[in-house]
Image: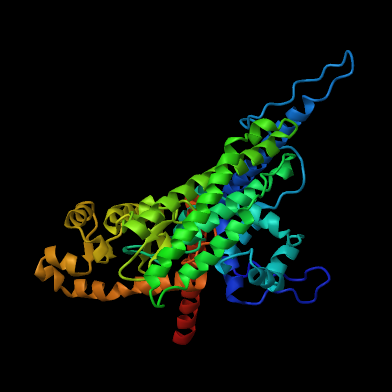
């Protein structure tokens, strides 16, 4: 690695201009070293920025064509046809200066390392960071606006992030920090950016959001849906939700909850009857003609969201009534679990507290690096993910693991035999289910016993991911955005791990000397 990529001698106007030798500085140094070795990372980030820029340009051109349609030409004057809305072959011309790809990459790493660059604490830390100050000043740059930073970092697609992880693992292998001969596979639960979905809160949230949308039509030159008694009904539902949530542990709690739910569903029915009747009489998208296409798209999304919320509120009311008054329970996959993230699922692992979110599969190498990750929608059984995880480890590292270790959730005899037939030398499965089909002499083998004891390493590994890198609580919504966020955090963790192992090696070398 190039030593001290952020150490600059004799910066103009400064007697001393060195970044402190902090962990953050070493992480950024390591990240910049990866870019030096793999310049294609910056090329891919630039391509992602092009996609973002072209999407904006396409929308501007659509609006320009719409505006031109209202403008008469002078007699005898002809102008060329404005460009169409297609982005294929559309050039990006000179405009406002764009964030350099390397700066976007650095903020991408910082966001993964700090867990965020959007909350107040992270922003204060970055503004106070001497490391970031040195990096920007050495390139003649100033700190970009926070909106610009977020827009560019979030523009980095999942494929580019996956490419960065692959390049990172290649660097780790090249520097002999790990040989990737071992893989420990486990899953964990990550909380979605969503509140716990009690039926009462879901009904209140959906109706409140639909009503708020109905009051934004004036932003598009239309009349809002009349408020009628909706605000009063919503306040009553809010009070009833509070009473329902605080009824537990009190005398006659079940009877009181039923009473409150009966009132709540009655108030919800009033709101639904009123808003659905109003919506049936309106078609705001067809009613406007003097809006640019971009504004028409916003209006269409607003109205579609309002209609979806009303439909979902009807469904939640139906299965709430079934549960409270008929004792019927629907499976979690048939219920609405989040107001903001439709991809979130009900995740329950090993008797731990259930969460609404995602269950990523993660592979840890022998020296503690993330070598593979699968983030799927829903709550698939762990056993279905073992073979894909081993395949991904091989694809990313170029090395087929010699030893694969997993817990009882992955214990399927046929899958174990498949991995062994595919070239994996040892498949260590831990738990009662695995013991039932693994021969006793193999189960009692010292290597097998050591693997079972060593499996706890993945627990501490996941704890570090969650505690230091925010892996357990998501900030973004939607499957693709969640995949991007978790890849970002895994990459930052691997940089942190590189710094830690190098520091330990240097300390051992000094001690030996």
Viewed as shown, does residue 383 lie left or right of 313? left
Residue 53 seen from this side: yes
- Measured as percent of width and height from the top left, residue 499 is found at 51, 72
Q: What residue do we see at 55% from left, 63% from top?
A: 238
Q: Residue furthest top?
A: 76
- Measured as percent of width and height from the top left, residue 240 is found at 51, 65
42 is higher (above) or lower (below) than 91: below
Viewed as shown, does residue 199 lie left or right of 51? left
Viewed as shown, does residue 299 lie left or right of 353? right
Residue 157 seen from this side: no
Viewed as shown, does residue 113 lie left or right of 433? right
Q: What residue do we see at 29% from left, 74% from top?
A: 454
Q: Quadrant of the N terminus?
A: bottom right
- Measured as percent of width and height from the top left, residue 299 is found at 65, 40
Q: What residue do we see at 89% from left, 18% from top?
A: 74
Residue 301 or residue 10, whichever sits in front:
301
- The image quarter in which residue 144 lies: bottom right
97 is higher (above) or lower (below) than 459: above
The number of callouts visible is: 0
The colour scheme used to paint the residues is: rainbow
- Measured as percent of width and height from the top left, residue 182 is found at 31, 64
73 is higher (above) or lower (below) than 387: above
Residue 239 or residue 375, whichever sits in front:
239
């Amino acid at each position: 690695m190039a030593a001290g990529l952020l150490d600059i001698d004799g910066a103009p106007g400064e007697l001393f201009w060195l970044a402190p030798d902090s962990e953050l500085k070493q992480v950024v140094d390591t990240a910049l070293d990866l870019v030096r070795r793999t310049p294609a990372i910056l090329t891919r980030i630039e391509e992602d920025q092009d996609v973002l820029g072209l999407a904006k340009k396409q929308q501007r051109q659509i609006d320009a064509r719409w505006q031109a349609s209202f403008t008469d030409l002078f007699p005898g004057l002809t102008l060329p046809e404005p460009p169409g809305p297609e982005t294929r072959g559309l050039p990006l011309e000179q405009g406002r200066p764009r964030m350099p790809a390397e700066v976007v990459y650095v903020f991408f790493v910082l966001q993964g390392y700090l867990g965020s660059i959007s909350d107040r604490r992270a922003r204060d830390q970055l503004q106070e960071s001497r490391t970031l100050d040195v990096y920007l000043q050495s390139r003649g740059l100033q700190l970009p606006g926070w909106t610009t930073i977020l827009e560019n970092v979030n523009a980095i697609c999942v494929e580019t992030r996956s490419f960065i992880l692959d390049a990172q693992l290649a660097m780790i292998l090249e520097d002999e920090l790990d040989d990737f001969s071992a893989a420990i596979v486990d899953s964990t639960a990550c909380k979605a950016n969503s509140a716990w979905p009690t039926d009462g809160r879901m009904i209140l949230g959906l109706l409140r959001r639909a009503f708020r949308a109905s009051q934004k039509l004036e932003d598009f030159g239309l009349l809002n849906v009349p408020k009628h008694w909706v605000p009063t009904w919503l306040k009553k539902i809010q009070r009833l939700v509070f009473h329902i949530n605080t009824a537990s542990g009190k005398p006659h709690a079940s009877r009181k909850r039923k009473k409150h739910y009966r009132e709540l569903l009655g108030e919800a029915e009033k709101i639904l009857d009123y808003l659905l009747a109003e919506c049936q009489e309106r078609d705001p998208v067809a009613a406007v003609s003097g809006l640019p296409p971009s504004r028409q798209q916003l209006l269409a999304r607003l109205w579609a969201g309002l209609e979806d919320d009303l439909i979902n509120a009807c469904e939640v009311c139906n299965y709430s009534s079934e549960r409270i008054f008929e004792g019927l329970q629907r499976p979690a996959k048939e219920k609405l679990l989040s107001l903001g993230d439709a991809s979130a699922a009900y995740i329950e692992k090993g008797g731990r507290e259930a969460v609404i979110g995602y269950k990523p599969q993660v592979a840890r190498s022998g020296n503690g690096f993330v070598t593979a990750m699968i983030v799927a929608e829903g709550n698939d059984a762990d056993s279905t993910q073992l073979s894909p995880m081993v395949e991904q480890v091989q694809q990313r590292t170029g090395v087929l693991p010699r030893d694969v270790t997993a817990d009882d959730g992955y214990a399927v005899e046929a899958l174990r035999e498949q991995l062994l037939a595919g070239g994996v030398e040892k498949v260590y499965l831990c738990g009662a289910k695995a013991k039932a089909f693994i021969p006793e002499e193999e189960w009692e083998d010292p290597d097998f016993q050591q693997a079972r004891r060593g499996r706890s390493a993945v627990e501490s590994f996941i704890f570090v991911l969650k505690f230091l890198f925010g892996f357990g609580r998501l900030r973004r919504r939607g499957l693709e955005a969640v995949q991007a966020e978790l890849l970002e955090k895994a990459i930052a963790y691997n940089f942190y791990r590189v710094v830690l192992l190098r520091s330990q090696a240097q300390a051992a070398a000094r001690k030996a000397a």
